[in-house]
Amino acid sequence: MANKKIRITGGQLKSRYLSFDGNDSLKPTKSYIRETIFNVVKVDRNMNSLDLFSGSGILSAEAISRGINKSTLVESNNKSYIRIKDEYSLLGIDNYEIYCIDVLRYLKTNQAIEYDLIFIDAPYNTNLLEKSIILLDEFNYLSQNTYIYYEQRKKDYNQKLVSIITKTHNILKDLNIGDVSYTIAKIKEK
């Protein structure tokens, strides 16, 4: 398999496609899950997002298409990093930053911790999702953000993640579709 395509589902770039390498183990977030995310999270021009384990870049592209001010993407795979930059250039997307760095290292060293929306789509068969959420909590990202979205394989559902998230956020959606479990949470009112 060479290139695969995934369609943006809403906003200015609706129906445009992003290409990604089908040989990689990328598993872009499915369109119906992205629709759910953006039905729950109403993005606007004042919001910024952090996209961890960016992969194909579809979550940030979707957020940008729907009007988010800026997205910061973190992707450690150099091939995916270059591909996102190329695809965003083809789509005319320029309101983003992308870092080719290990996500855990980024979370420990990044100075800007205020993001309105955080996406986490860590590779399956790893403990990177749990480690990322622990670091988000430890380094106060969670207390500085509004919405968080993460997904995991349904058979690997980790209740500990909900326990961490609910210290600062209310769970809005915690659902399974196919073999994917996904969670959307919003910061608790103060």
Image (cartoon, rainbow, N blue to C red):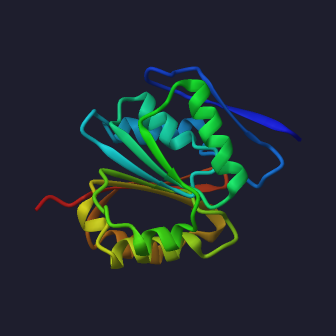
Q: Residue at x 52, y 21 (%)?
A: 14
Locate the N terminus by quadrant.
top right
Q: Position of residue 138 (x, y in %)?
A: 34, 79
144 on left or right of 151: left
Question: In the rendered image, which quarter is residue 40 located in?
Answer: top left
Q: Residue furthest left?
A: 190
Q: Residue at x 45, y 78 (%)?
A: 160
86, 138: nearer the viewer: 86
Q: Position of residue 19 (x, y in %)?
A: 70, 34
Locate the C terminus by quadrant.
bottom left
Question: In the rendered image, which quarter is residue 126 located in?
Answer: bottom right
Whether residue 111 is visible: yes
175, 139: nearer the viewer: 139
Q: Is residue 160 placed above or below 13 in the rendered structure? A: below
Q: Position of residue 94 (x, y in %)?
A: 46, 33
186, 4: nearer the viewer: 4
Q: Position of residue 81 (x, y in %)?
A: 63, 50
152 on left or right of 169: right
Whether residue 27 is visible: no
Q: Residue furthest right?
A: 1
Q: Is residue 12 placed above or below 154 in the rendered structure? A: above
Image mark count: 0
Q: Is residue 165 placed above or below 170 in the rendered structure? A: below
Q: Residue at x 51, y 55 (%)?
A: 182
135 on left or right of 57: left
